[in-house]
Amino acid sequence: MTANSGFDVFKLNKQLLQAIADAGYTEPTDIQSKAIPCILGGQDVLGVAQTGTGKTAAYLIPVLMKIKYAKGVDPRALIVVPTRELVVQVTEQIAKLAKYTDLRSVALYGGVGPKTQIETVAKGVDILVATPGRLMDIYLTGNVSLKKIEVFIMDEAERLLDMGFKPQINRILEVVSRKRQNLLFTATWSNKVKRIAEDFLEAPTEIHIDPEVRTAKTVSQKVYFTPNIKTKITLLDKVFLDSPAKAIVFCKTKESATNVYKYLVRIEGEEMVRLIHGNKGQNARLNSIQAFRDTGVNYLVTTDVAARGIDIPDVGLVVNFDVPLVYEDYVHRIGRTGRIFNTGASITFCAPQDEYHLRKIEKLIGEKVPVEELPEDIRIAETPFEERQAQLREIDMQRKKDDPSFRGAFHDKKRKKN
């Protein structure tokens, strides 16, 4: 390991410093610089930072330093995250950072039978990484003890709450050791997160990294106004011709994602594209992410199931084929690129009925997304009648939502006929 790396200042042991160097970390990010000393000092910490800024390592490095070596059977650190994919990712990062220690970590998540997970826990574990539901399932059957937890980390807190895990979190808080250090990390700072932070943390050190800037500065943004789905498909083809970068395409629905995937398979070949959505089995989803991360697969098409927590450093481009309806998801989608010290690009295709949602997103992030004119060589397809009618109905609904007195174009037409 090269001497005097940026992490030397934290007085970490040589095993951890070597693993940090092997992982390619040379200088700590802002959240790491501020959180690591506080966690090492035993303080409760509330960390708010944009996605892609190194939050996971910000808590893993000091936790690994505090636990140091394998001890006993029961876990001493508990990390709760919202999704199975994030459990796998955090566990993989632990393996990298703890590679020169004998520390044992176990991943607990649903979608697969619990038998193997229970057997692994029974052999002894130091760090438990879990989704709330699977953790409580295994706890309630008496197959894991949480009485010796010294550090409890809640990561992606806003997503945990968005996914309805508050009851499970409250139950976990009732059964873990009272004498513990609590850490809460989140990319977005909402009233829901504030409330759970008040319940969870005791006199915490609050670390807010650029909280007023909701999108990462390392990611460029632009939007194309696209009249219909056919034009979106043509534009997607053009974007990928112009940019050879590894790319994630986000779609609003499983049907949309499947159609985009089938198109890309025809154009790029099956070996270059993977698809993830809610109907895909757990193993299929994990295999697709692994192939996208480690092989020649260049395109991942997904719904928002993969918008948060997936850390693939060399993603150069994010395409929002559809504007997200959950506005915070825009921040998390484009945060899949430009991670840590890398730069990336994001492109959004905005249909007429989605302009309403785009304006709401711009209000949330506190900035206008730059508009790009459609390339001259893009053929603008005529919008089919049914698609246009659906667009108009949705626009009517949006206008009624903002102005209850608005009667709507369809209502007016019907009234004129009578």
Image (cartoon, rainbow, N blue to C red):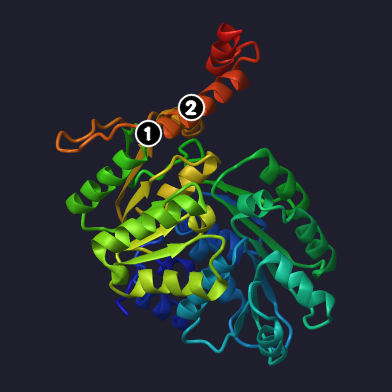
Label located before the other in sequence (1 or 2): 2
Tell me which residue sits at (47%, 40%) in the image: 214
| Residue nearest the viewer, comparing 27 with 166 | 166
CA separation in Å, label 1 and label 2: 21 Å
Please state which of the two labelled residues, at mark 1 or mark 2, is closer to the viewer: 1
Q: Residue furthest bottom?
A: 123
Q: Is residue 23 above or below residue 382?
A: below
Q: Tell me if residue 311 can be seen.
A: no
Which percent across, then down, holds residue 180?
A: 75, 67
* Image quadrant assignment for residue 272: bottom left
Tell me which residue sits at (76%, 59%) in the image: 169
Tell me which residue sits at (53%, 28%) in the image: 394
Q: Which residue is mark 2?
A: 356
Q: Which residue is mark 1?
A: 384
In-image side of 304 versus 104 (left or right): left
| Residue nearest the viewer, comparing 3 with 218 | 218
